[in-house]
Amino acid sequence: QDSDWDGLVLAKAGLKRLDMLDKATETISQDIMLPAVGQGALGIETRTRDFQVKAIVAPVNDADTESGTRAERGFLRKLEGGCQVPIGAFGEVIDGEVHLKGYVGAIDGSKSVRGEISGSPDDAASLGIQLANQLLKDGAEEILLEVREALEPNE
């Protein structure tokens, strides 16, 4: 607050956890920018066959968050995205359905494609893949190829 900065973009989830939402002066609309995959979701990793630990952590799992995150991760996995690739996604459960928004953009912002899909939480990961396939057809494949070429080290 006391810095000479003109602004700072922070995750709303982080501000909420710190009980500092009142410090935010603006919330960026999802029509302008989608978050990176998995933003705001917390996870607990367990061993595959450790059923005792799985039973202990099960009560803290939020099924809606899990479904939204599975949709986002399916989207990212299909697009083979990473930290430096401009891909955004937001999945949430509304009225019992997963709603997923996705975005792929050029590094310089000159081109982008967006899309949305909805369906059953049971199909969350496949919804992400379906949306990724649609965006690939709509121009994301060309954008991602250009992004990957730009990120490759010069030989």
Image: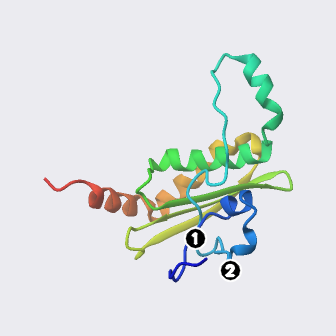
- Residue ID at (74%, 47%): 65
Q: Position of residue 109 (x, y in %)?
A: 42, 74
Q: Amino acid at mark 1?
A: Met
Q: Are marks 1 and 2 in contact (CB under 8 Å)?
A: no
Whole-number angstrom distance, CA of label 1 to CA of label 2 = 17 Å
Q: Does residue 129 appear in the picture of this structure?
A: no
Q: Name the residue located 63 percent from the left edge and 21 percent from the top edge.
A: 47
Residue 83, image x, y percentages: 44, 53
Q: Which mark is residue 25?
A: 2
Residue 152 badge: none
Precedes in sequence: disc 1 or disc 2: 2
Looking at the rendered structure, the secondary structure element under dot 2 is loop
Tally the numbered discs. Answer: 2
Q: Is residue 20 left or right of residue 8?
A: right
Instruction: Pick whichever, 72 or 116, lies toward us.
Output: 72
Q: Secondary structure at mark 1?
A: loop
Task: Say if 80 sits above or below 117 in the image.
Answer: above
**Crowd band around label 2 with a 10 angstrom C-alpha radius: few (<14), some (14–19), many (20+):** few
Above or below residue 104? Residue 28 is: below
Quadrant of the image containing the N terminus: bottom right
The residue identified by callout 1 is 33
